[in-house]
Image: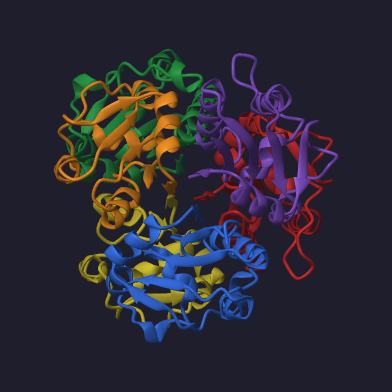
Chain colours: A purple, B red, C blue, D green, E yellow, F orange
Amino acid sequence: MNIGILLKEGPYNHQASDTAYKFAEAAIKKGHKVDAVFLYNDGVTNVTKHMDPPQDDRDIARRWNELGKEHGVEVLACIAASKRRGINDDVIIDGAEITGLGTLTDIAIRNDRLVTFGD
Amino acid sequence: MNIGILLKEGPYNHQASDTAYKFAEAAIKKGHKVDAVFLYNDGVTNVTKHMDPPQDDRDIARRWNELGKEHGVEVLACIAASKRRGINDDVIIDGAEITGLGTLTDIAIRNDRLVTFGD
Amino acid sequence: MEDVKKIMHVMRRAPHGSIYTYEGLEMILIMAAYEQDLSVAFIGDGIYALKKDQDTEGIGIKGFAKTFMALDGYDVEKLYVDEESLEERGLTEEDLLVDVEVLTSGEIGRLMNEQDVIVPH
Amino acid sequence: MEDVKKIMHVMRRAPHGSIYTYEGLEMILIMAAYEQDLSVAFIGDGIYALKKDQDTEGIGIKGFAKTFMALDGYDVEKLYVDEESLEERGLTEEDLLVDVEVLTSGEIGRLMNEQDVIVPH
Amino acid sequence: MLHTINRSPFENNAMETCIRFLQPGDPLLFIEDGVYAVQGGNRFSDLLESTLKTNPVYVLQPDLAARGISAVVEGVERIGYDGFVDLVEDHQVNSWL
Amino acid sequence: MLHTINRSPFENNAMETCIRFLQPGDPLLFIEDGVYAVQGGNRFSDLLESTLKTNPVYVLQPDLAARGISAVVEGVERIGYDGFVDLVEDHQVNSWL
């Protein structure tokens, strides 16, 4: 099965980002293809590279980066939502990309499922 | 009257930032002193300098910056909350400052009121 | 028409207090160009997005209620409103800016089950 | 003691689903060093923060329930729990990690009115 | 103590919880999505009317206008941001977020 | 159609709204703060029990454990993230945020 994920909340403040990650991880382990994680609303702040959580806490940006690199998951942030919130190419992690809502539409069309996480 | 403001949500996603600004503006116009706006939780993202909203929309970071400059309001972001969310000195607007929760305690003690905005 | 998907956007938040409805509308406008089978369901506080006479000048936020009137021009014509949500809020179809289809929750629930994709806003 | 302010922290959110309770607790721990008259009220879903047997390993988030047990060591001893919130959730004092004072909403409301500052989390 | 409520009562329990803790005479102010509570003829009108017997109730007019609400329950007073500041001058604040 | 609910029923109306639109036979999955709904003996137990007569109900066990809940209403099935994926394999998803 091919899966797209839509993530609508930022890191740490809401559990949505954690649940989306755990879901993606489980889907990949079961042999499904996670095609892309599309970040919308405050979700675009999941990929800011300056994130510096306490040492005993998870590093959410790095986790998305690794998921992308190791399993070919595209990590995409909506450009309009990003601009509003001060996210641009200078502040996002390697491997993430800023793109338009047309890309989300393609993801919704080409995958078997679109699963949304938010609050 | 001396007023401290605690702002717990980020810009655009929730109205909290707008209401806090309108309240501060009205208080100043009435001759009160707005001592500080302390940013906590996702509120720390109010002062990211790369914010680039559509031309016909308000620029929330610039608005906080101007309130600080013109009326001596300290605009402060909690350091622990900022680090988690990828906010540091490199990405915040001039005039805003990253500081600890002790500063918020001082604000709560030295002002007549602490008014909280969030969601 | 193997490539046409049934995509329903579900609006459940009040406007202005949060950005979800507005950014949801931006998403719908982009998706409208892709010639999919789009619909929008207004449920709970989501129906407030269609309320007539919204004037956001005083809160300093750009209004967007009128953009819903433009959806027709983008061929987004399936706008469903939950009857019980209207009643509970003391509103009628007359209070809404655009022509909508008022349906029972059972009818909207059955339409949901026909969708390939549901996007909550 | 002109400088001592009565500051009440109000916990109304469930833990883990959002960070408010955790970051609220971080704030309380810092404020405790300033020798003010601190109290914490647990209302509604806020009481879940004190639920025994929380094990967050499976969701990959650091737990913090035990930090509430440390508040005593910081001289934060006024922990109030709303009785109706417990009952509505089918919980009793026995389900909570720490010793608290269970009060009626009227009693907590009157304590709120004595405060110089109320911080909602 | 001034109590502020900024969430729609249809979506969130903030209004009902706040009223449970409210002391007689304390002012209640509805802002942001909270203002839907004061529109007449909805599911919360009874609760609001009984609260009005013991407490003054205010609503932020700019938030009402933004949401297209003109009719409000009788006895609810409309104020602007300056009226909000006046209330804060007279009371400490308890925000029910 | 798989319906997911991630908000506490005590704070937010997502569960009650979702159940109003739910078609018989469709699975319901509680995640995140939504899991408080399935703890036995609370205000929502009756609604949940009547839903169980027409729909399968699941709860994400890691979220239950994180919140210290062990007793759940009879008939509710505990699953892990892999069980969540299985449900998504069988159904389109409707998230009631």
Residue B63 picture location, percent across and down: 75, 59
Position above or below: A68 against E62:
above
Decide which of B24, B14 is in the foreground and name it: B14
Question: Residue at the bottom extreme?
Answer: C94
Position above or below: D18 against C99:
above
Position above or below: F51 against C81:
above
The residue that appears at 51% across and 20% down in the rendered structure is D60
Residue F10 picture location, percent across and down: 29, 44
Residue F94 picture location, percent across and down: 42, 49
Decide which of C41, E17 is in the foreground and name it: C41
Q: Quadrant of the N terminus of chain C?
A: bottom right
The residue that appears at 42% across and 70% down in the rendered structure is C47
> Is C15 positioned to the left or the right of D65 in the image?
right
Position above or below: F37 against F70:
below
> Is E86 positioned to the left or the right of D114 in the image?
right
> Is D101 positioned to the left or the right of C30 in the image?
left
Residue B31 visible in the shown view: no
Specify the quadrant of the image occupied by residue B71. Answer: bottom right
| Count of all numbered marks drawn on residues in the image | 0
Decide which of A77, E74 is in the foreground and name it: A77
Specify the quadrant of the image occupied by residue E29. Answer: bottom left
Decide which of A54, E52 is in the foreground and name it: A54
The residue that appears at 45% across and 56% down in the rendered structure is C115
Residue C5 visible in the shown view: yes
The residue that appears at 57% across and 57% down in the rendered structure is C2
Residue A81 picture location, percent across and down: 69, 53
